[in-house]
Image (cartoon, coloured by chain):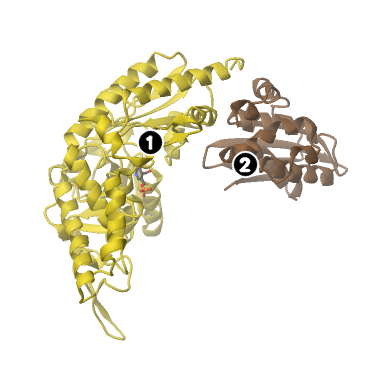
Amino acid sequence: MNVAEIRKDFPILGREVRGKRLVYLDNAATSQKPRCVIDAIREYYETYNANVHRAIHYLGEYATAAYEEVRAKVARFINAPSERTIVWVKNTSEAINLVAYAWGRKFVGEGDEIVTSVMEHHSNLVPWQQLAKARGARLRFFRMTPDGKLDLSDLDQLFNERTKLVAITHASNVLGTINPVAEIARKAHEVGAVVLVDGAQSAPHLPVDVQALDCDFFAFSAHKMCGPMGVGVLYGKEELLEAMDPFLFGGEMIGSVSLEESTWNEIPWKFEAGTPNVADVIGFGAAIDYLQSIGMEAIQAHERELVAYAMDALEELDGMVIYGPRDERAGLIAFNYREIHPHDLSTILDQEGVAIRAGHHCAEPLARWLDVPATARASFYIYNTREDVDALVRALLRAKEFFSHVPR
Amino acid sequence: MSLDDLYREVILDHYRSPRNKRKMDDPTVVVELKNPVCGDEITLYLKLSGGVVEALSFEGKGCSISQASASMMTQAVRGKSLQEALELVERFKRMVRGELPASEADLGDLEALQGVAKFPVRVKCATLSWEALRRGLESDEGRVSGEVE
Ligand SMILES: Cc1ncc(COP(=O)(O)O)c(C=O)c1O
């Protein structure tokens, strides 16, 4: 993998920030976009913009074919058995909400249990809280090991005949933990539970095979994987999607409509009311081609190498506290440094052109579990280099210098 | 724009040794305010009597800007009438949002926080304690809690 060449594909990486080279380490929030994605969107609007599915004219047919081709591409990307299992949504959050309404409100009842974890992004927690409230169900949580992994030793008690759903993130956006989703799914299926995997932080970074994981639902966002904002994916097993009622009603999702009654379109269109975000789906197609031209294995290997280098470099600094497991982890590191508040760190790093994130990263219960008000987070992607890590370290030392006269 | 605009010596001094950072035994109003986006929290204790802010103290967690701002606020507001205090809140907020030049804000030491205006994402850090004060002054109850957006 040639990172120098990859960097040239991203126009934004050529810009300066505050007179410094941009060191973009906020990839877990959103990734940058390669030129081919930007061009694909422009090409769509310049040469074949038309509404999909309904038009009987050249542009409409062309746009529909291109749009549906991306659905097939996504299916292949996560090894889904058919493009009928791929539902377009606008992001991971919407995908999870769709399941919480269209599956949850129909199949979760009083006294049922939903198992999730303290490391979830709010997107994979709040919809289940709401569902549990609405249906009189109960939320239960995986136990955690002290280093921030799921403790699976008590699954036999946690999963039982009341367990209807297990909703778990594939990779934590704070701890970097990669959860053993296949094993969890196998255990959950033994008690007849349905398994939803939040893939927002895994699909961009490692090879995903939904059939090997054997999860029932898998959700992810294009914008974290070189694609545009505004497109997300819900994968669902066919029989589940078939059994669910629609989430939104209106155009496109119907079979036939009379004044009193309607029937629903087939899956996946049953869940896609109204004009979809065609341009950004097209852009997402270009992003998947781009990632596949590099190779997901190569991307994973690159991030592993970089994160190991960063861990070593950060651990050299005294007063550094790193959260999450030491071994196998996703390409991000959350930390606190010398008790300098993450906001202050972020402001000082920003002056050096280094973009990180500070806060609870939409995982407030996890911050509470870590017993910190906030953490700083550096997250990597295909175009990040050891020089970026070195720039991070230099900027941290500058922060140390700046606050050196503040004894804490 | 440089870091020294934001982190003035007097700010770092208040961060290093915050004034009036303690629980109050006999407050008339207690305000708990949280910025859910960043996790900053403040508990502000007010002793209001005869239309005057007789005493203030605070507890909380947050970055240097939020802590220094709270500390400086407790000094600036003590002894002011409720009306004066509310006006101060307004002037302070307008200054750190860049709507009012420090030279016209007449805020004394607090003018050290004018640099915040050049760091828009940090404005909320600076205003958290002041928003707590506003809510406390305008409340009829002894206890207020809430969040800022
Ligand atoms: C683990 C995880 N889940 C869900 C989300 C939500 O993604 P989106 O904002 O695209 O809906 C994120 C993104 O921040 C995430 O990191």
| Near-viewer residue (A27 or B103) | B103
Inter-mark Cα distance, 1 to 2: 41 Å
Residue at horizontal 53 percent and vertical 37 percent from the top: B39
Instruction: Name which residue type carries label 1.
Output: Gly
Residue at horizontal 33 percent and vertical 50 percent from the top: A228
Q: Chain of mark 2?
A: B
Q: Position of residue B107 (x, y in %)?
A: 79, 36
Q: Quadrant of ligand 1?
A: top left
Q: Position of residue A308 (x, y in %)?
A: 29, 21
Residue at horizontal 53 percent and vertical 42 percent from the top: B36
Can you tell which chain is drawn brown?
B
| Near-viewer residue (A48 or A315) | A48
| Near-viewer residue (B9 or A100) | B9
Instruction: Answer yes or no: are tags 1 and 2 on the same subunit.
Output: no
Q: Which residue is mark 2?
A: B33
Can you tell which chain is drawn yellow?
A
| Near-viewer residue (B74 or B145) | B74
Q: Which residue is mark 1?
A: A14
Residue furthest to the right in view is B50
Q: Position of residue A311 (x, y in %)?
A: 34, 20
Q: How many marks?
A: 2
Q: Is residue A79 above or below residue A17?
A: below
Report helix, strand or loop for mark 1: helix
| Callout 1–callout 2 Cβ contact below 8 Å | no
Q: Is residue B108 above or below residue A230?
A: above
Q: Is residue A387 above or below residue A56?
A: above
Instruction: Name which residue type carries label 2.
Output: Leu
Report helix, strand or loop for mark 2: strand
